[in-house]
Image (cartoon, rainbow, N blue to C red):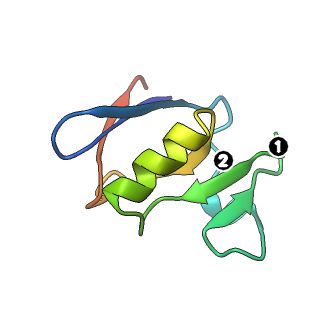
Amino acid sequence: LTVSLYTDDNQLLKVLECPYSISWSNCTSTQNSDIRTCDICERQITDTGNFTDHQLRRLISQKADACLKVELNQDNLRVISQGP
């Protein structure tokens, strides 16, 4: 599954591609409630649900390969799913 993330003004933020598509509830909690660890690849995943546009841009610019948790109905970005 491939997901493209856009700002409200249609600027592409990031294309997410995860071969695992693991559920947030199946990831290991950390001391930070917005970050969990994938039990398959052991990478950190950041929940972007409460991020501002500025915070999203900063995170992605600082760590282009960041794994992100996003919801289709998030207010802070537009999510377009491609593929099955």
Other residues around mark 1 within 10 Å, as few (<14) / some (14–19) / many (≥20) = few
27 up-or-down from 40: above or below: below
The amino acid sitting under disc 1 is Ile
Please report the residue visible at 70 percent of the width from the left and 74 percent of the height from the top: 32
Please report the residue visible at 32 percent of the width from the left and 55 percent of the height from the top: 53
Percent x, y of residue 37: 77, 56
Q: Secondary structure at mark 2?
A: loop
9 up-or-down from 15: above or below: below
Front residue of this view, candidates 84 and 49: 49
Q: Which mark is residue 68?
A: none
Front residue of this view, candidates 12 and 28: 12
Marked residue nearer the N-terminal end (1 or 2): 2
Q: What whole-number distance in Å separates the C-alpha atoms at marks 1 and 2?
A: 8 Å
Return the residue at label 2: 22
Return the residue at label 1: 40
Q: Secondary structure at mark 1?
A: loop
Percent x, y of residue 30: 78, 71
